[in-house]
Image: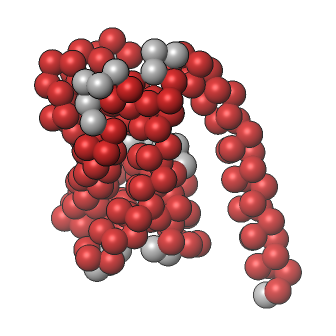
Amino acid sequence: MDNYVLELINNFGYFGMFLGMVLEAVIIIIPSELILATGGILASRGIFNFWVTFIVGLLGSVFCAVIIYLIGYIGGEPFVKKYGKYFFMKEEDISKSNSWYTKYGLIAAAVGRNIPIIRTLISLPIGISRLSFTRFLVYTTLGSIPWTFVFVYFGYSLGNNWTILKDYLDRLKIPIIFLLIVYLVSKIFLKKKKG
């Protein structure tokens, strides 16, 4: 996968990076972290410009969210249930995104853009709910800025030492998921206690 992303970006430049981000929305197995960090690495070598890389990554990320939003908006739940598997959308991941959106509304569009798996699928329930596209776009863009900047910056800072970042990410995923679960359980508990 690493070589595929590198070749895509090396062969097509910024457009390859944008294309990689779009493919992340359609084929969720391509990690956006890798695409963004690769752009950052190329910026550290002077092949790309840091800020252009960041903007291309942000545009690609938002474009992905729009695609998923439109799938939900136009196709609705029946389409997702019937064809979601062809886009590597697992039912349990879709359920997580739905419940995340049900609890937190449009804030979920912003915050969810920074949580693996949820970041890709959070646009789906928002599209199915047919919420305002403009509001969705604003929240999604603002929410995509931290994720995009962090990974482009890490790639830029680490240069050729991408494997170090990958090792750290693998170690951090479990604590982040654990903290997220603790946070959600405490919110549910407090809500039930008040009610």
Q: Is residue 22 left or right of residue 172?
A: left
Q: Give the residue at x 28% y 49%.
A: 55
Residue 152 image point, x, y percent:
42, 37
Q: Give the residue at x 69% y 44%.
A: 176
Residue at the extreme bottom of the image, as rendered = 195
Residue 150 image point, x, y percent:
50, 43
Residue at the extreme right of the image, as rendered = 193
Q: Is residue 192 left or right of residue 89?
A: right
Q: Is residue 67 left or right of residue 113?
A: left
Do we see residue 166 in this rendering?
Answer: yes
Residue 18 image point, x, y percent:
22, 39
Quadrant where the image shows the N terminus: top left
Q: Give the residue at x 50% y 58%.
A: 112
Do we see residue 128 in this rendering?
Answer: no
Please state which of residues 25 and 192 is positioned toward the viewer in this rendering: 25
Asked if 48 appears above or below 161 in the picture, the reply is below
- Indicate the quadrant where residue 44 lies: top left
Residue 91 image point, x, y percent:
46, 46
Asked if 114 appears above or below 6 in the picture, the reply is below
Please state which of residues 48 and 187 is positioned toward the viewer in this rendering: 48
Please state which of residues 35 and 193 is positioned toward the viewer in this rendering: 35
Q: Give the residue at x 82% y 76%.
A: 190
Quadrant where the image shows the C terminus: bottom right
Asked if 5 appears above or below 88 in the picture, the reply is above
- Indicate the quadrant where residue 68 lies: bottom left
Colour scheme used in the picture?
secondary structure
Q: Is residue 165 left or right of residue 142?
A: right
